[in-house]
Amino acid sequence: MSSTLPDPHLDQLFVQARTHNAWTSKPVTDDTIHALYDLLKWAPTAANSNPGRFVFVRSAEAKARLLKSVAPGNVDKVKAAPCCVIVAYDTEFHDLLPQLFPARDMRSGFVGKPELITETAKRNSALQGAYLILAARALGLDAGPMSGFDHVALDAEFFPDGRWKSNFLCNIGYGDAEKLFPRNPRLAFEDACRVL
């Protein structure tokens, strides 16, 4: 990769992209969901561990189950979005490392180390959730990530065997730009960065 993306592409991914809370009625199709995953799966994770798991909640029945654990301030957002993604992680992701990292034995480094498993799974599934947002924007979708929900209740409802655990939620679809809030500021380089 040797070239910088043109400004319009950077605008779509970052500069002009917004967090959406209101949505049009345009659906997110199966083909779009597959294309979304087929993009985000190529982004890096530690030891190619890929612990992220994604549940695309679209049906009225699944939405009703999800809404039971969503914070009151997020209920209307989830109801209106054509799709809400549960970004989760697999607590047994390391069992797939022989397939995902065949060059070396990475699995044995996790066996019997639940704290390392959880730390690695949470961090890297969060990365994959961020890749989900960028992939969605690259495909012309908008995104609205949220952390306001009851993790325990959601996991009991959707992941009762305990293997997958929720990390955060992300609405995806085609946002209603007329209902965007004024854009909030960001920190300046001097406030957020150090070059040593």
Image: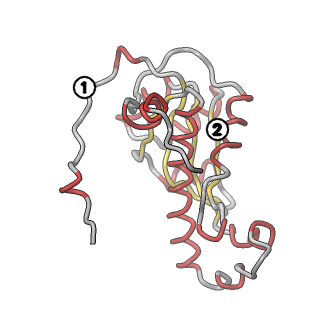
The x, y position of residue 109, in whole percent, is 65, 84
Q: Residues within 10 Å of mark 1 (few under 14, many from 20)?
A: few
The x, y position of residue 179, in whole percent, is 34, 17
Please tell me the numbered disc located at residue 56. 2
The amino acid at mark 1 is Pro
The x, y position of residue 107, in whole percent, is 72, 79
- Whichever of callouts 1 and 2 sits on the residue coming sooner in the sequence is 2
- Please report the residue visible at 51 percent of the width from the left and 54 percent of the height from the top: 167
Mark 1 vs 2: CB contact within 8 A: no
- Residue marked by disc 1: 182
- Please report the residue visible at 35 percent of the width from the left and 34 percent of the height from the top: 73
Q: Is residue 119 left or right of residue 160?
A: left
- Please report the residue visible at 24 percent of the width from the left and 25 percent of the height from the top: 182
Residue 141 to residue 176: above or below: below
- Please report the residue visible at 67 percent of the width from the left and 52 percent of the height from the top: 42
Q: CA distance from mark 1 to mark 2?
A: 29 Å
Coloration mode: secondary structure
> Which quadrant, please, contains the C terminus?
bottom left
Nearer the observer, disc 1 or disc 2?
Answer: 1
Residue 122 to residue 103: above or below: above
Q: Is residue 162 left or right of residue 191?
A: right
The amino acid at mark 2 is Phe
